[in-house]
Amino acid sequence: QVQLVESGGGLVQAGGSLRLSCTASGRTFSRYAMGWFRQAPGKEREFVAAISQSGGSTYYADSVKGRFTISRDNAKNTVYLPMNTLKPEDTAVYYCAASSGSLNSPDYWGQGTQVTVSS
């Protein structure tokens, strides 16, 4: 079992920055690809960013490319998502996910952290 705990959400003005963190329990963190997803009110959950087990490969939704950067520290069992130049449309609950295979179907989800961007 892997438990994921997100932190770092909050309220920020448009153009501002936040850094999300997700810390995993257990000793197998480095075996999992990690991803961030988000769900805005009334919308389906959508992919934001992903990183491979070693951190050597990263992937982004077009809507966040150039503004968000995913990284991981396997020694700290933590994945990060610094978010810059935030826009009101980035407002959502952000979820961390872990997958031993494809992030199309994660094995584990965090509880989510709210990000609100005011205009």
Image (spheres, rainbow, N blue to C red):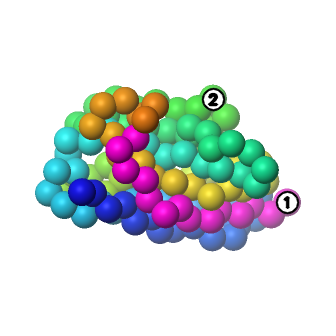
Mark count: 2
Q: Any magenta on residue 114?
A: yes
Tell me the element at label 1.
loop
User: Residue 105 vs residue 31: left or right?
Assistant: right
The residues bearing labels 2 and 1 have C-alpha atoms spaced at a distance of: 21 Å
- Residue most toward the left? 27
Residue at left offset 56%, top offset 40%: 48
Q: Nearer the viewer, residue 108 or 49?
A: 108
User: Residue 40 vs residue 6: left or right?
Assistant: right
Residue at left offset 58%, top offset 32%: 61
29 up-or-down from 76: above or below: above
Indicate the quadrant containing the N terminus: top left, top right, bottom left or bottom right.
Answer: bottom left
Residue 72 seen in the figure:
yes
Q: Any magenta on residue 83?
A: no
Residue highlighted by disc 1: 119
Residue highlighted by disc 2: 62
Tell me the element at label 2.
loop
Quarter of the image where one finds residue 99? top left
Q: Amino acid at mark 1?
A: Ser
Indicate the quadrant containing the C terminus: top left, top right, bottom left or bottom right.
Answer: bottom right
Residue at left offset 54%, top offset 45%: 37
Q: Amino acid at mark 2?
A: Asp
Residue 102 placement (x, y as % from top left):
37, 29
64 up-or-down from 25: above or below: above
Residue 15 seen in the figure:
no
Residue 111 placement (x, y as % from top left):
49, 63
Which residues are the magenta region?
106-119
Dot 1, how many residues are within 10 Å of its Cα: few (below 14), some (14-19), or many (20+)? few
Sequence-first tag of 2 and 1: 2
Residue 21 placement (x, y as % from top left):
42, 61
